[in-house]
Amino acid sequence: MSLYKNKYRIESARLSRWNYASCGYYFVTICTKNMVCHFGRVVGGKMKLSKFGCVAVQHWLNIPNIFPFVTLDEFVVMPNHVHGILIIDHGLRNGRDAIYRVSGGGATHRNNPMGCGTLGEVIRCFKGKFTFEIRKKQSEYFTWQPRFHDHVIRDRTALQNIRNYIHQNPLKWNKDCFHVYK
């Protein structure tokens, strides 16, 4: 932790010299606040979505309609979090070529202004639209954890490993350290 205006602040979890508007593959995990299981339950290794879970899937699938430069890859809505791979492609005809830009070093801009098609902008929109709809339609209170986890996928082996992890996540739910129904 460092000081800013004599107050401690949490350091960014983001890759410090990476421009999160760069074309590439990104693995993200978005959690509910306090890991509350709003999205459903895992039964027999399969996710059974609640109303909240269905709305989360709907908003996740809508991301490319709001951000045409984003392509969705593997994703899963779990009881208290969402895992997904997002492909940001600001003009390449074949999004899979973006992975080579990542392994080749990518962009190194330190600043990452909003409104430039960043990963943070996409996730903030997803979380905001989901929360707005839930709070408008449901009587139950919902909130997200303030941040999200991301990982820049650097090669095809890592991409396949992450796809497998996402796909197998419901099967391994009972061994998950956050397997708590609150």
Image (spheres, rainbow, N blue to C red):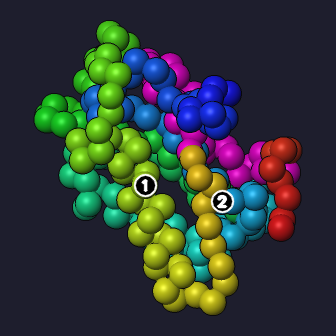
Residue 49 picture location, percent across and down: 63, 71
Residue 176 picture location, percent across and down: 81, 45
Which residue range is magenta in the image? 148-174
**Circles 2 and 1: CB atoms closer than 8 Å:** no
Residue 41 picture location, percent across and down: 75, 67
Is the residue marked by circle 1 packed among few (<14), some (14-19), or many (20+) residues within 10 Å?
some
Residue 11 picture location, percent across and down: 59, 30
Left or right of 65 on screen, residue 62:
right
Is residue 110 visible in the rendered image? The answer is yes
Of 106 and 175, which appears nearest the observer? 106
Quick one: SS at disc 1?
Answer: helix
For the point 75% across and 64% down, the residue is 36
**Is residue 169 in the magenta section?**
yes
In the picture, the disc for residue 76 is none
Q: CA distance from mark 2 to mark 1?
A: 14 Å
The residue carrying mark 1 is 124
Quick one: SS at disc 2?
Answer: loop
For the point 67% across and 44% down, the residue is 168
Q: Main secondary structure of the magenta part?
A: helix
* Label tally: 2
Left or right of 137 on screen, residue 169:
right
**Is residue 155 in the magenta section?**
yes
For the point 43% across and 34% down, the residue is 26
Is residue 88 visible in the rendered image? The answer is no
In the picture, the disc for residue 32 is 2
Left or right of 119 on screen, residue 117:
left
